[in-house]
Image (cartoon, rainbow, N blue to C red):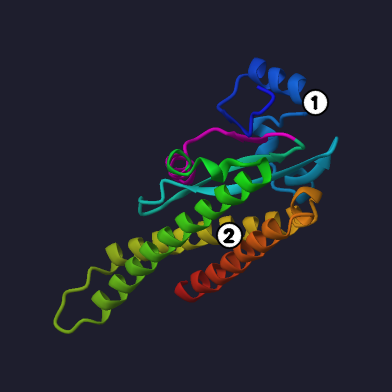
């Protein structure tokens, strides 16, 4: 539809990619291209659109969360997202949009609200991981307790791995925020600029918190 604000491609087929490419004049990256780690493959501009790929935490309630790439395409029309999993922030935002449809006024605004949900979710996962580390420390130094070091080392190792994945996600988001800050659709909107700066500060704050936990 001409008034579409968000096109969310979930495990798209090649035929579905082709439909969007034709309709919007875009090139939709493949799953293999999304997995590339080089900045030139993850952050670029093409035909008036800004492409950014971020590693988003997945299964954050697990002892060892995963990270998977999501590509966001800022266009002169709808926001396009490409993903091959179900990150909780997307579901959380969808529920919020049902209550507050006005949040979905434009593609750039929607992008910022998705990123806000992503940052909020990372904050929750980081807090849970910090609590696990604290519990391990408390157990190790508790008086008159038998310490199963092999089990505790395994749990501590998983917590450190979780911290590394949290850092991977946050560091990537920081690069995304810096890159989209010069997109004319955000740069020319004072409210969007302020929202993006707030998200950037939150990401940097969480990076510092996560490093302290590690």
Element type at marker 2? helix
In the image: residue 201, left or right of residue 26: left
State the image coordinates of residue 72 (x, y, percent, origin top left): 66, 41
Q: Earlier in the sequence, mark 1 or mark 2?
A: 1
Identify the residue at image location x=66%, y=41%.
Answer: 107
In the image: residue 156, left or right of residue 172: left
Q: Quadrant of residue 34?
A: top right
| Farthest left residue in view | 144
Query: With respect to residue 109, does 149 lie above or below?
Result: below
Point out the stretch of residues depicted in magenta. Answer: 77-96
Name the quadrant of the N terminus. Answer: top right
State the image coordinates of residue 33 (x, y, percent, origin top left): 70, 35
Identify the residue at image location x=45%, y=64%.
Answer: 160
State the image coordinates of residue 14 (x, y, percent, origin top left): 66, 18
| Residue at the disc numbered 2 | 170
Q: Quadrant of residue 51?
A: top right
Would you call the spot at circle 1 few (<14 residues within 10 Å), some (14-19), or many (20 or more)? some
Q: Quadrant of residue 12?
A: top right
Query: With respect to residue 204, does 144 lie above or below?
Result: below
Query: Is 90 contained in the magenta span?
Result: yes
| Residue at the disc numbered 1 | 25
Would you call the spot at circle 2 few (<14 residues within 10 Å), some (14-19), or many (20 or more)? many
In the image: residue 147, left or right of residue 96: left
Identify the residue at image location x=55%, y=26%.
Answer: 11
Depth check: give the residue in front, 147 or 74. 74
Identify the residue at image location x=59%, y=48%.
Answer: 55
| Farthest top residue in view | 15
């Amino acid at each position: 539809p001409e008034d579409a604000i968000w096109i969310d491609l979930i495990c798209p087929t090649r035929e579905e990619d082709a439909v969007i490419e034709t309709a919007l004049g875009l090139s939709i990256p493949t799953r293999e291209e999304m997995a590339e780690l080089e900045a030139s493959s993850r952050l670029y501009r093409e035909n008036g659109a800004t492409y950014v790929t971020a590693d988003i935490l997945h299964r954050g309630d697990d002892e060892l969360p995963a990270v998977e790439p999501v590509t966001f395409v800022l266009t002169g029309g709808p926001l396009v997202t490409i993903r091959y999993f179900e990150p909780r922030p997307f579901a959380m935002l969808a529920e919020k949009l049902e209550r507050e449809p006005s949040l979905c006024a434009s593609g750039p605004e929607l992008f910022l609200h998705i990123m806000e949900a992503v940052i909020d979710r990372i904050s929750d996962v980081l807090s849970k991981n910090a609590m696990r580390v604290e519990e391990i420390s408390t157990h190790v130094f508790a008086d008159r307790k038998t310490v199963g070091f092999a089990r505790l080392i395994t749990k501590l190792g998983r917590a450190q791995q979780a911290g590394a994945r949290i850092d991977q996600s946050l560091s990537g988001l920081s690069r995304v925020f810096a890159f989209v800050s010069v997109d004319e659709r955000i740069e020319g909107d004072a409210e969007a600029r302020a929202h993006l700066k707030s998200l950037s500060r939150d990401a940097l704050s969480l990076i510092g918190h996560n490093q302290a936990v590690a």
